[in-house]
Amino acid sequence: MPRDPVRHGFTGQHMVVVPDPLRAAARAQPLLRGLQVTDAGYFPAARHHRIERETGAPTTLVILCLRGAGWYRLGEETCAVGPGDLVWLPAGRAHAYGAAEDPWTIAWAHFTGDEVPAWARLLDLGATAREATIRLPVDRLEEIALDRVYAAIERGFSLRQQVAAAAALRRSLSEAAQLAIAPTDSRSARDRVLASAEALRRDWQRPRRLVELATAAGVSVTHYSTLFRHHTGFAPIDFLIRLRVQHACRLLDTSTLPVRDVAERVGYSDSYYFTRCFRRVMGCSPRAYRQRQKG
């Protein structure tokens, strides 16, 4: 680690700081109360980059490493950072970070607001240093689009631009939550499990057994279930039930088929079991769903 922080910029950098008076005024805006970007930027090949905050920052910081390498320290623990790592440094906690010998290229944003703890939970981030990073597929980092955050406020500090920056940050964090690689995951296992989920979407009527799905993905049943839930939010069979109920809703909305026929068309020979599954997912019976005013 270099001894002294760099005081000059980096060729090709972007860095925008929302003026303090505008930040304070924006806090009263309902559209920024949940999430407000205070500063954001992009540092390419940031050789000798180093920041140290002994009492932390007043805002939360997210750093996405696009290329090269770096490090961060949270509390007493220091962790390495490489391409695809997204680092979350909470407000008010002592931290330091910087570029390694092969200097990192990073996009970053400081932000505050009522939503911040909920985003940390959605991203499965914890309190320790090693729980402050999520891994993302390197070949899909463009989908995170963190550059849109600083681009929005580079165009000005109006309420519209600040709202646009907050919306861009929400999109970036949402994409990161979708793409995050589980700690026990490997690239190939992740791809096979995602392919399995896509196969279920295409062929949702066919009966499936968990062991069959895991074998096709080349992992154990336990590992398959863990990865599948991580990437879709549901256990595999529950995911399949929800797909069938989704198609059942379409038939109930667009046809006059009796419920028993709808059940058969979405893969259920027992209409009573179909009704139980439908009620568990939708909170009402198929008949009650059909009678609702929708749209």
Image (cartoon, rainbow, N blue to C red):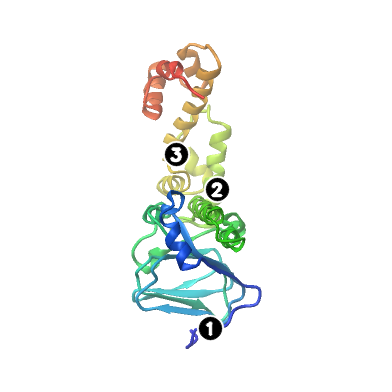
> Can you say whether 95 is above or below 28 in the image?
below
Looking at the image, residue 12 sits to the left or right of residue 287; the answer is right
Q: Quadrant of residue 42?
A: bottom right
Circle 3 sits in a helix, a strand or a loop, which is it? helix
Q: Amino acid at mark 2?
A: Arg
As helix, strand or loop, the secondary structure at mark 1 comes to: loop
Q: Position of residue 45 (x, y in %)?
A: 61, 76
Depth check, front residue: 95 or 249 = 95
15 lies left or right of 263: right
| Residue carrying label 3 | 236
Give the vertical position of 49 relative to 34 (above or below): below
Above-or-below relation of 231 to 17? above
Would residue 184 be visible to someone looking at this image?
A: no
* Residue position marked by numbered label 1 in the rendering: 6
Residue at the spot x=53%, y=27% of the render?
Answer: 205
Question: Badge 2: few (under 14), some or many (20 or more) residues near its Cα, within 10 Å?
Answer: some
Q: Is residue 64 above or below residue 245?
A: below
